Amino acid sequence: MNNFEFASPTKIVFGKGTEKEVGKRAAEYSKSVLIHYGSDRVKKSGLFDTVVASLKAEGIEYSELGGVMPNPRLGLVREGIELCKRKDIGLILALGGGSVIDSAKGIAAGVANPDQDVWDYFIGKADPKACMPVGVILTIPAAGSEASQSCVLTNENGWYKRGRNNELFRPKFAIMNPELTFSLPPYQTASGIADIMSHVMERYFTNVQKVGFTDRLCEATLKTVIENAPLVIENPEDYDARAEIMWASTVAHNDLLSTGRIGDFGSHQIEHELSGIYDVAHGAGLAVIQPAWMKHIYKHDVTRFVQFAVRVWNVDERFDNPERTALEGIERLKAFFSSIGMPVTLKELGVSADRFDEIAAKTFQERGSGVGNYVKLSEKDVKAILEIARE
Amino acid sequence: MNNFEFASPTKIVFGKGTEKEVGKRAAEYSKSVLIHYGSDRVKKSGLFDTVVASLKAEGIEYSELGGVMPNPRLGLVREGIELCKRKDIGLILALGGGSVIDSAKGIAAGVANPDQDVWDYFIGKADPKACMPVGVILTIPAAGSEASQSCVLTNENGWYKRGRNNELFRPKFAIMNPELTFSLPPYQTASGIADIMSHVMERYFTNVQKVGFTDRLCEATLKTVIENAPLVIENPEDYDARAEIMWASTVAHNDLLSTGRIGDFGSHQIEHELSGIYDVAHGAGLAVIQPAWMKHIYKHDVTRFVQFAVRVWNVDERFDNPERTALEGIERLKAFFSSIGMPVTLKELGVSADRFDEIAAKTFQERGSGVGNYVKLSEKDVKAILEIARE
């Protein structure tokens, strides 16, 4: 096991009706709040009004900034920074999923560091020194951004999608009511599930030896998501199944599952190019890329893939043929993604082979630390993975 | 799943050599530190000198208060409170295991609330309003107090051992170097293991339905401890096995495993009377009481005990005989405790049957909320459990 540091300071407020507490939680930080959101869905659903009423009851003034797109854009972040300065905002309240939360984190970092350019954090040119408080009301369990140190933004100038980890990015509180996810359409639900599982799998595949505890925590999280996924696809209003997936989404990415180990994240890096260029749903992109990545690299450590197959997918181990056992686990992952309505080929995603070279090349641009950790990928590897995922 | 709140703000600094960072961590809180510890073991081992050197390098003044006993006493807590006031201490640094950490928490709460009596927190008469910062260098993985909201003290006036949970009790940082546990004797190592497992099992047995995620996290934690226990008993300097157990001890009790569910803690309450009266090692007491508790109450929910047997103990499920499967799981737990050198009867512990009535009666004294949650126990139940554990 490697040395590590870990804390998960974000106050999780989980369960039915918890969004009504937002005013009380926000008041601990500021009397001037920016409500940040994506589409009008949060207004149509009544959530926006609930939030405003709760803020008003605490005497909190609010401004609003909507329009966050999936794969949140740097342009809106810059707009948010100016708005916060103008309105003297003290807390950004993100209403939505990972895109809105990450946009809020970008704004929060930009406001708190007026001498730096926010994009520099994402291309490794600068480190934020401070961050405004961010609060969350989560409506999409997927990115795990509600309690994570991660933030991913897309720069429209060249369509670079780049992530940055920093402890300052952890939200102060995250209100999580599974009922708010009842209205998520099946495709978005399934994309979220693929994203959650990917966060765990990116951590699971590690070269660090003797990390049995976090292995088992990863397996527990994956099995939970796998068991509950068909329940929420079948019945979107299954509270307990929605709750299990929602809580798993947070644990999958708050770095508990990284303690003492180094994950891979190569599939995420490749997928960022897909969704940067094609604007596909991040989880759908991962459902295509990650099994292809596994097929390309599993020989790096067949034993780990056997463990994955046996413990996560209940594959009956073939002791005389570890490779077959390993491959069966990867096949079950693919079959699972298909079963919940995810694409498993680039063709299904609408990504044509004539852009593979471009995607592979771009994966390595403005990315100092290379692509992947478990296996360091070359441009040739990325092309091979795209070929495997082709159709 | 129930509604819940959760945060784990304690900064864990885990791994080889991390104790040398203590000055830097302490300096974030105060330039005047009380080093709190138990026996001279921390001086003989060189840890005390390492800590002092690290504090001095940061210009931190220190006082010291040793002499914490297992089942830490209220008397020393009161002494520590006076000392902190006199010396204007700003951070208590606990060097040791749960007893030292809990003593430090008691002192920290006492200092910060001069208008209240600290014992009142433990008998439900008052709530602390504030708490001084506590830092930890952990040398015994067992109690999980290094990141928990729990504190257990023993009042010598009547030998009442009583616990209190409060978010204010969470330490600010916990430095955890598995190498510092190499010198733990086998019996103390095994007692710690029993305590860790008990913290998980107290949470596992719940009446809350549809808590599959935390079930699996509990099972993952138990399996990790079960797998690594024989390794550390056999080779006390197995770094990775020590590390797995140490990290599991924290996760077992920081309340992640309680999220959305209500545990039992009846076995802990009964054991508190044993160790309050007989001063036995807490973990050893739990190794005796908890399997007896299981045998007494398993019919309350046979299915849960079947799950425990199958998932935690790899019992081959007898579908035609759930009770037998359930009982087999309990037997394996007992056999496991025996295998690592723990007592499994009160006779082995030196507790004689003529005091069962007294122990049972005392379990209910000054305890407002009753004994147990999964199953609410009567005094008669407690006597029956003691009888099962007799020999």
Image (cartoon, coloured by chain):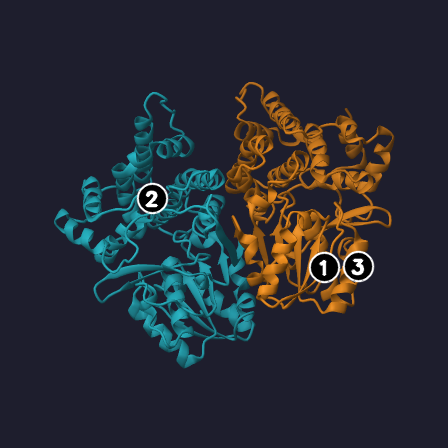
Chain colours: A cyan, B orange
Spot occupied by residue A164 in the image (x, y as percentages of width and height)? 36, 60
CB-based contact (under 8 Å), mark 2 and mark 1: no
Which residue position is annotated with label 3?
A: B78
| Disc on res. A136 | none
Sooner in the amino-acid sequence: mark 1 or mark 3: 1
Q: Using the image, determine if residue B224 lies above or below residue A20.
A: above
In which chain is the residue bearing label 3?
Answer: B
Mark 2 surroundings: few (<14), some (14-19) or many (≥20) residues within 10 A: many
Which residue position is annotated with label 1?
A: B64
Check disc 1 and report its element: helix, strand or loop: strand
In which chain is the residue bearing label 1?
Answer: B
Check disc 2 and report its element: helix, strand or loop: loop
| Foreground label between 1 and 3 | 1
Please name the amino acid that badge 2 sits on. Tyr
Mark 3 surroundings: few (<14), some (14-19) or many (≥20) residues within 10 A: some
Instruction: Depth check: give the residue in front, A81 or A382.
Output: A382
Instruction: Depth check: give the residue in front, A139 or A6.
Output: A6
Residue B66 seen from this side: yes
Report, in whole angstroms, how far the alpha carbon at label 2 lies from the one at label 1. 46 Å
Image quarter where the N terminus of chain B lies is top right
Q: Using the image, determine if residue A192 lies above or below residue A332.
A: below
Spot occupied by residue A185 in the image (x, y as percentages of width and height)? 35, 50
Tell me the residue at 59%/41% (across/down): B208
Which residue position is annotated with label 2?
A: A374
Check disc 3 and report its element: helix, strand or loop: helix
Spot occupied by residue B338 in the image (x, y as percentages of width and height)? 66, 26
Report, in whole angstroms, how far the alpha carbon at label 2 lies from the one at label 3. 53 Å
Farthest left residue in view: A354
Please name the amino acid that badge 3 sits on. Arg
Farthest top residue in view: B320
On the rendered structure, is B370 left or right of A90? Answer: right
